[in-house]
């Protein structure tokens, strides 16, 4: 009888172990077979708005130039959204993305800290000697737009006052909001996210550069249908309304 009980216990343990082993294998297969979240590489200025359009995607927000470089190097992006047509069009010509589509625009403004210690009241004031100006680096869309405006207004001497060249527009906003710089050029949408920490000075009429946001599906995406669906979401009335509510201009 004791031997019978031992045999029964051994058999029961064997069934239990087999069941656990089978359960673990199934879970592993499910995990392996499960689809990963869609990966969207997007300009830093889209940080607040894109998750309101699609909260399920995984986002990588940074300067459009940096993201383009990462895509060229094989980063696992499914969708690329830039604050300029320059990089999406270049990637398209290189055969790395599908044909880009314009989905929004923006406005460049000058921001100063709320207490405005330098007493800046107009754009020309950023060229005064000793003014601590922060801008985005060359190659970053907002940095290129900034230089375009300064050139248009014949204020390129202001670049002698630059104390920091930031990797993206968020860096410019942070430096000004924290009082580490006395002025900086950013998108109106990013100025709005800084709230009461900064004051906004608009550019003179006729000096506003054309700003074109473009989006494209990355050709080597393993989730082409989902990537195309995301682009449709951005272009759909609901997506466009979300962008408009965040202060973007619609094409």
Image (cartoon, grey):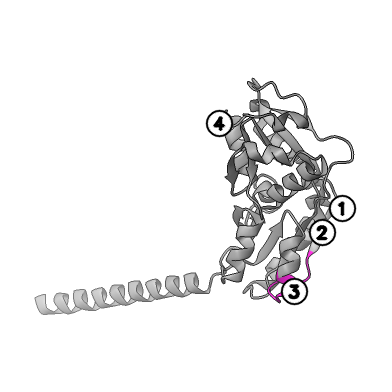
Q: Is residue 29 left or right of residue 196?
A: left
Query: Which of these two is toward me, 197 or 24?
Result: 197
Q: Secondary structure at mark 4?
A: loop
Measuring from the top left, give residue 23's x and y in whole percent: 39, 72
Q: Are marks 4 and 3 in contact (CB under 8 Å)?
A: no
Who comes first in sequence, dot 4 or dot 2?
A: 2
Q: What residue is disc 4 on?
A: 180
Do the CB atoms of the residues marked 2 and 1 lie less than 8 Å apart? yes
Marked residue nearer the N-terminal end (1 or 3): 3
Say which of marks 1 and 3 sits in front: 3
Whole-number angstrom distance, CA of label 1 to CA of label 3: 23 Å
| Residue 153, picture quadrant | top right
Would residue 183 be found to the left or right of residue 31 on screen? Answer: right
User: Bounds of the magenta span?
Assistant: 91-100
Q: Distance between the Cα atoms at labels 4 and 1?
A: 35 Å
Residue identified by numbered label 3: 93
Residue drawn where x is 67% and y is 25% of the image: 196
Please say whether residue 52 is visible from this viewpoint: no
Q: Nearer the viewer, mark 4 or mark 3?
A: 4
In what element is the residue under mark 2? strand
* CB within 8 Å, label 4 to label 2: no
Residue 193's label in the rendered image is none
Q: Position of residue 11 (x, y in %)?
A: 24, 78
Query: How far apart, in angstroms, are the residues tagged by discs 2 and 1?
Result: 7 Å
Q: Nearer the viewer, mark 3 or mark 2?
A: 3
What residue is pinned by disc 1? 251
Q: Give the residue pinned by disc 2.
A: 102
Secondary structure state at the residue bearing disc 3: helix
């Amino acid at each position: 009888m004791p031997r019978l009980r031992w045999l029964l216990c051994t058999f029961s343990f064997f069934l239990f172990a087999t069941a656990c082993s089978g359960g673990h294998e199934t879970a592993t297969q499910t995990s392996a077979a499960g689809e990963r979240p869609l990966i969207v590489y997007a300009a830093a200025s889209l940080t607040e708005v894109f998750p309101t359009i699609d909260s399920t995607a995984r986002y990588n927000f940074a300067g459009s130039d940096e993201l383009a470089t990462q895509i060229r190097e094989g980063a696992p992006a499914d969708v690329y959204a830039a604050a300029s047509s320059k990089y999406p069009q270049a990637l398209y010509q290189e055969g790395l993305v599908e044909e880009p589509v314009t989905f929004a625009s923006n406005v460049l403004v000058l921001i100063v800290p709320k207490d405005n210690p330098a007493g800046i009241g107009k754009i020309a004031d950023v060229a005064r000697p000793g003014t601590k100006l922060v801008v985005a680096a060359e190659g970053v869309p907002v940095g290129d737009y900034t230089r375009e405006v300064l050139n248009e207004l014949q204020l390129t001497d202001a670049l002698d006052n630059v104390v920091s060249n930031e990797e993206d527009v968020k860096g410019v906003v942070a430096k000004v909001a924290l009082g580490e710089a006395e002025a900086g050029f950013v998108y109106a949408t990013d100025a709005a996210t800084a709230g009461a920490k900064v004051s906004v000075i608009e550019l003179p009429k006729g000096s506003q550069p054309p700003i074109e946001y473009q989006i494209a599906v990355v050709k080597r995406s393993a989730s082409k249908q989902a990537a195309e669906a995301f682009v449709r979401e951005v272009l759909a009335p609901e997506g466009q309304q979300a962008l408009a509510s965040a202060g973007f201009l619609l094409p």
